[in-house]
Amino acid sequence: MAGPADHSDSGSGSALQAVFERLRSAHTLSLTLASPLCLAVVALDRYLSLQHPSGESYSYDLTITDGRWRMKCQLADGLSHWVRTGSLRCGAGVLVSLLSLVHDETRLSHSYLRIDGIHSVVELPERFMSIKDVEKIPQWCQDYVTRSDGPLQLSRKYYLPLWINDDPYGTVWIPNNPPPDVVIDVSRITLLADLDAFFHSSRRPLPLLVRILHRSRIRYYGKPGQNIDFPFQVYCEVADQSGVMSMVVWNDLCPEWFNRLTVGSVLYLQQYSLKHSYQKRSRPQIHTLSLMTFHSIEICLNPRSPASVVTVIPPKSVQPQWGLPDVPYNFATRSEVDQMNSNQACDVIGLVTYVGRVERIRSKEKTGPEKFWAYRWVHAVDGTTDSHFILEIFSSSQPEIFNNICPMTYLVCTQMRVCQTGFSVYLTSSTETQLFITGCHKKQPYVNEPKVKAFIQWTKTLKDSVMLRRTAVGGHYRYPPAPPTFTPTTTNSNMTNEFSITAVAELKGELESLQYREHRRVAVQGHVTAVQFHIWPPQPEPPHSHQQEGVSVTDSTSPDLDITVSPKRRRVQTGSRVHCQYFTRSKMQSNRYNAGMQVNFTSPEEEEEEQQDEGELDESEGEDEHTSFRPSAVGKETDQTSQVPDVQQAASHPIALWESRVWPLVKQQVADHICSGRLDQESIPEKFHFDDREALLHDLNLSPARWNPDLTSQTHTHTPVACPGYFMLTVLGLNQTAAVDVLFVPVVSSDDPRAAGVPHTQHDNSLLSCISSGRLCVQPDGSFPAPESLMSSAPALESERVVCIVDLCLLGEGRVEMICSKLYRTADICQPDSTQ
């Protein structure tokens, strides 16, 4: 098969120009390249699709470069799955095999290139590494028109954020600049309490003078075929001396005013309209303000009919005699949260100690295009107790803050909701939540709150070096802990601890439908028929181990999960390099190597001492291994069996193994065996280092919509938090027709952020107890049990019918995380009502 073409010597040295000239002079508008053209992906832009037969909700424009020119192209709708699954990403190379020239027949001189065929996605070739500033690459624009600030399909006026819909994105969203000095006439204004009289008459209401107390995140309600240029909505709660009322900002006014309508701002409103209030909308809880709240009508700011006039009053021009109320807050300390009722709203301030990666869940809305919510888990302390605030923070239309939350920053979250679940309590954000981090607190209305001042005084007593040792970022993290007993429901839910049971054979469909960084939690039932223990980080094998009989290796991160078919069974690939060898006990005896047999769990006390001596060496080796594991090419047509690194062979060899009596008898007849592959580095939380802040945030956040060569080239040392190894569990479905391998990573240290979500009660350290509780217990001598010791209790699994709660997350580039977060034994499973 021919390799990718460079084309750098043709024409003016620009491969893009050469391709465009060939298309323009061809008799047809489509061009199939004999050798795929390698281009760098500079930007990915998403917008709502027109009505397409394919049924795709969103379309994508790609900005690509050959190093000489950059050009915006449209991605054919049939290829959008490359973006949705995180395989096609900014800063990667794309091998383009088929292009078309598209003319807009309703306009003069508007044509563009469309990418109709992708051979594969590759790591960025060396010749692109010299690019430092993408904006300095000239944009190709000769005798056709491209739009740099909007979609190539001119019927769309705006781009959406790449992964969610509720952030401001693009140049149409005006930034928040200081308001100019203005002169207003306050002699003829009306009060909120008097608006009801205007609403029931034909008189146009007088101007309003109000303060914003709360602001919602952006709501996008666009649908294909809809004839609205900017289908956005934002609502605010505004107040004057007479009361509080909702104000809704519609359509074109959202991009113009959203960033300028900040909490605490004073507005002078003219030519607004009034309508009946939408009662099903969520509302902030305002308990500390002794003002009446008006729920029957709401203020509407519209771009036309009539066009509302909004004026922001500079803070220095706000007069006390206007009688505008201050922004109300209800700050709660960590020690107070435990006593609060579920769904009660509060504001919190804390010092961040842990930040999880950004993930997505699907919105449950039944109408319109599919939508995702982005969220992350955060731990913070405020000094009032040893416990953390555990915060589930959803995107609040403040990407510059949401994406920059990191350890050792002061975080303020307003309008958080208390979630009481059994013995656990955490806070989740609401539609009205606002976020503020270090660098954003100056001049905010809450700075003089007593509890905020007390927190600041407490932080002055801390030593940065001590707090820094308590910090961590990333990794697999789930909260709240699953309930002690399992009760199935009729519907599945990502937002609660209630699950319906998914057949093991149906997991293949669940995996194939996952999108990039989408989290989904499923429950499967069956029997644990095999357990393997692997050390972490993995150690390289001797060269002779490459030839182990029966090792099957695949290497592909195409957007569709490949199914490798063998004569005996087929397996769904869910990792970049998936190994599907099964080891008998006798084979494992011959394959074990001496170094691996010495692996033991260390106690937290020993761990800190050893880390000082061995940490830098071991962790640098782990980083090198992960780098060598990452595939250099992505695509179904690439060679999938050559040049397998030593480390990946090592990852397929457990140092301890148990198999049930049933498994050797039935595994050859299993039709579907879904293999999880090795543990991904992204699944393990790591220590936070100030020097690595930018690189860490880049990895924790969703894949960016713009290529930043400086960030892409940055690397950092991965310092894992207390993970000496992990278990691979093979769960066989009850009908013995399908099986799945899931990973279980036990909590072994209080430094692990996941320790907040596992019970602290002691157990007997049997394998079943460890997996069902999620943790290992310290033995009387202060150590943890060795893997062999744990495996000696595995035969107890023989007779257990289990329900396994599995967290699925598509990490991107073909890597699927399948981690067991809870295993229920037979005694912990409640039988459903027979009438259901």
Image (cartoon, helix red, strand yellow):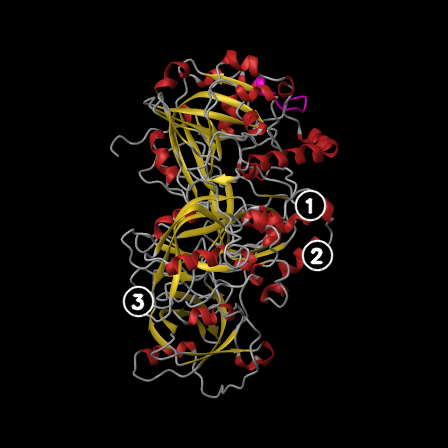
- Choose top left, top right, bottom left or bottom right for residue 752: top right
Give, as a three-letter code, the residue at label 3. Answer: Glu
> Is disc 2 surrounded by few (<14), some (14 to 19) or many (20+) residues within 10 Å?
few
Q: Which residue is mark 1?
A: 468
Residue that label 3 marks: 105
Q: CA distance from mark 2 to mark 3?
A: 66 Å
Majority SS type along the magenta span: loop
The image quadrant where one finds the C terminus is top left
Q: Classify the position of the N terminus by image quarter.
A: top left
Q: Which element is circle 2 on? A: helix
For the point 62% across and 51% down, which residue is it? 694
Q: Secondary structure at mark 1?
A: helix
Question: Residue 692's x, y, as percent?
Answer: 66, 48
What amino acid is labelled 2 in the image?
A: Gln
Front: mark 2 or 3: 3
Q: Residue furthest left?
A: 835
* Label 2 vs 1, first from the N-terminus: 2
Amino acid type of the residue that numbered disc 1 sits on in the rendered structure: Leu
N-terminal of the two: label 2 or label 3? 3
